[in-house]
Image (cartoon, rainbow, N blue to C red):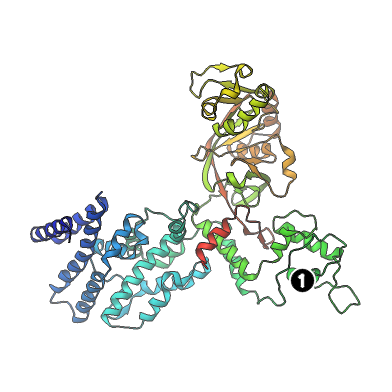
């Protein structure tokens, strides 16, 4: 034992002689969580776990009037807590409390009196049964009951031996708080595995003690646990889709279709029968015993509709992307749906009745009023290198005929090379140059500067601002919801890009097709007197005008690769940022 460890241990023994146990527990807990020295923190947390057992034993050994069976259960629980591996306690320094089972349980049982929470000598209580029912049905939410130790719980369920009951109580405690966390904030496994990829997943500040207290306090635990899931229709629809996919019969005759040349209408190709089979089409050339190899009109129509359901270009041509969608197995589709349900759990659970929602993967935007979509528009999202983030916020104001303050990264990476080629480029693009980003910056003549002598770092110090007009990169209007991502919705003069089926062209912001329709949607919610003519008059004036919303409009940036359409059909979309693949790699490691 080191000098530090010996000192801390002796200090704890001295304090134990003079302080009531509950004060010593409180001191150890607060000190263990706040101490800056890693070695001291590990030791204090180890003593905290051991003290849990001491408190439990002392609390019930003194109660001579307690029934013998209850006393045996309490002592078994104390022994079980005391057996936690001390070497794992230091894990808390790098991981959230929920990720450290032993420290999590020590905290719960210390705070709540070191007593059995869910079981008695007669076995599991009513709340234990409710918890197990929800864990058993976790698969309905796209979760795996095994992740909540259901087999281990059920193996101890019928036992009445004190040691087994003690272990069962702690199993239920840990897994109910884990279930509550995962349903409320998304599975912590994603953040723990790759925090840089899944920054939104989980809640590292989650309080397991508060979760247990809520379970113990409620008179209707089933209602409490049921209310944890997202409330909106998109999540509920995915639950329906998941149940439907699982209920489908196993695929017969399904096969992986080989890549090869493009298959155009009228072509003959040996892969056509497999395409028919995977598509579910039974069409065959009349009078032939073997499936036709001709890519005929009926199959073209079926493929075109299939492409539309999968966010693909609806040209009827079977290429690599269409083949990839045709090669999705039943298991693949189930995995995609569960991945989308996982993402929804770490976003806002209540989207509201009226809001704007962007589906990044589908390049689409919907305006929802009173829980019904009333507006649908195409959007352009960030490139793979500049991905549009997923988050929720509120639109505070609309900026008509806006200026565009060019980000320093674009000034450095794009405008500086362009200026070295053509010193007049800023003038030609109606961009003004200012000496800095400060309020007292002066305007400079960009044509008189030797841009070859300007470094990239110096370029980032200049402020470049594009004037309003048809040339402005933000178009006629932008929709501002201040956020640390510096992302917003806006118009664009590059209207031709909306003709593309895959529209990831921006630097992260979302460009909106028919932005004035979105403006009308937002403003009419504020004041029914707004009309398209009034909005067009503002735009035609050429003058900048900011219209603030007295009631900010919720906006949700989402990434959905599976959902139900208005006909109740399951839609799948391309994983443009490969986020499904990364998420499923954590859920289903090979």
Nearest the camera: 21 or 466?
Answer: 466
Looking at this view, name the residue that lies furthest to the front.
Answer: 453
**Residue 174 left/right relative to 521:** left
- Res 72 quadrant in image: bottom left
Q: Residue at x 42, y 70 (%)?
A: 148
User: Picture coordinates of residue 526 (x, y %)?
Assistant: 58, 37
Q: Residue at x 58, y 25 (%)?
A: 464
**Disc 1: which residue:** 274
Is residue 235 in sight in this rendering? no
Element at label 1? helix
- Res 25 quadrant in image: bottom left
Q: Residue at x 72, y 55 (%)?
A: 312
Q: Is residue 512 above or below residue 282?
A: above
User: Picture coordinates of residue 432 (x, y %)?
Assistant: 61, 21
**Residue 445 left/right relative to 171:** right
Q: Is residue 408 above or below residue 66?
A: above
Q: How crowded is the residue under tag 1: few (<14 C-alpha within 10 Å), some, or many (20+)?
A: many
């Amino acid at each position: 034992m080191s000098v530090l460890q010996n000192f801390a241990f002796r200090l704890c023994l001295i304090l134990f002689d003079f302080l009531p146990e509950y004060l010593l527990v409180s001191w150890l807990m607060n000190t263990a969580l706040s101490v800056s020295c890693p070695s001291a923190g590990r030791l204090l947390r180890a003593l905290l776990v051991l003290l849990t057992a001491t408190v439990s034993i002392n609390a019930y050994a003194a109660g001579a009037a307690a029934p013998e069976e209850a006393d045996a259960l309490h002592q078994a629980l104390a022994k079980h807590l005391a057996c936690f591996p001390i070497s794992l306690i230091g894990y808390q320094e790098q991981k959230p409390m929920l990720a450290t089972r032993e420290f999590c349980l020590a905290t719960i049982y210390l705070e709540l009196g070191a007593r059995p929470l869910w079981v008695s000598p007669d076995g599991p209580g009513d709340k234990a049964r409710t918890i197990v029912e929800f864990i058993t049905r976790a698969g309905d939410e796209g979760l795996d009951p095994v992740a909540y130790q259901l087999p281990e719980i059920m193996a101890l369920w019928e036992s009445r031996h004190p040691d087994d009951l003690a272990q069962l109580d702690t199993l239920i405690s840990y897994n109910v708080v884990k279930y509550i966390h995962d349903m409320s904030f998304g599975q912590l496994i994603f953040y723990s595995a790759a925090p840089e990829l899944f920054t939104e997943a989980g809640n590292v500040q989650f309080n397991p003690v508060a979760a247990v207290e809520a379970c113990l306090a409620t008179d209707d635990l089933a209602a409490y646990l049921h209310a944890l899931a997202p409330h909106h229709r998109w999540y509920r629809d995915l639950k329906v889709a998941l149940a439907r996919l699982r209920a489908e019969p196993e695929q017969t005759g399904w096969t992986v279709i080989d890549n090869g040349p493009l298959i155009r209408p009228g072509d003959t190709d040996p892969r056509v029968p497999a395409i028919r089979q995977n598509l579910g089409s039974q069409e065959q050339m009349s009078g032939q015993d073997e499936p036709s190899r001709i890519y005929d009109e009926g199959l073209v129509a079926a493929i075109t509709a299939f492409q539309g359901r999968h966010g693909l270009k609806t040209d009827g041509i079977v290429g690599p992307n269409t083949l990839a969608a045709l090669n999705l197995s039943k298991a693949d589709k189930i995995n995609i749906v569960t991945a989308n349900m996982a993402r929804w759990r770490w976003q806002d659970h209540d989207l509201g009745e009226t809001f704007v929602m962007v589906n990044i993967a589908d390049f689409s935007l919907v305006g929802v009023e009173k829980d019904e979509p009333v507006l649908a528009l195409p959007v352009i999202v960030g490139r793979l290198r500049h991905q549009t983030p997923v988050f929720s916020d509120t639109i505070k104001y609309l900026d008509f005929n806006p200026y565009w303050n060019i980000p320093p990264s674009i000034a450095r990476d794009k405008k500086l090379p362009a200026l070295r080629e053509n010193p007049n480029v800023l003038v030609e693009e109606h961009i003004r140059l200012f000496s800095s980003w400060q309020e007292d910056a002066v305007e400079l003549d960009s044509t008189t500067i030797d841009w070859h002598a300007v470094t990239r770092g110096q370029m980032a110090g200049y402020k470049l601002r594009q004037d309003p007009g048809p040339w402005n990169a933000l178009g006629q209007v932008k929709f501002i919801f201040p956020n640390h991502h510096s992302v917003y919705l806006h118009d664009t003069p590059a209207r031709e890009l909306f003709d593309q089926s895959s529209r990831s062209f921006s630097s992260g912001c979302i460009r909106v097709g028919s932005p004035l329709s979105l403006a009308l949607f937002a403003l009419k919610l504020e004041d029914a007197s707004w009309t398209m003519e009034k909005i067009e008059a503002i735009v035609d004036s050429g003058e900048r005008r900011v219209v603030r919303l007295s009631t900010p409009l919720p906006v949700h940036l989402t990434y959905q690769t599976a959902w139900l359409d208005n006909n109740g059909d399951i839609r799948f979309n391309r994983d443009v940022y490969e986020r499904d693949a990364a998420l499923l790699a954590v859920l289903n490691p090979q």
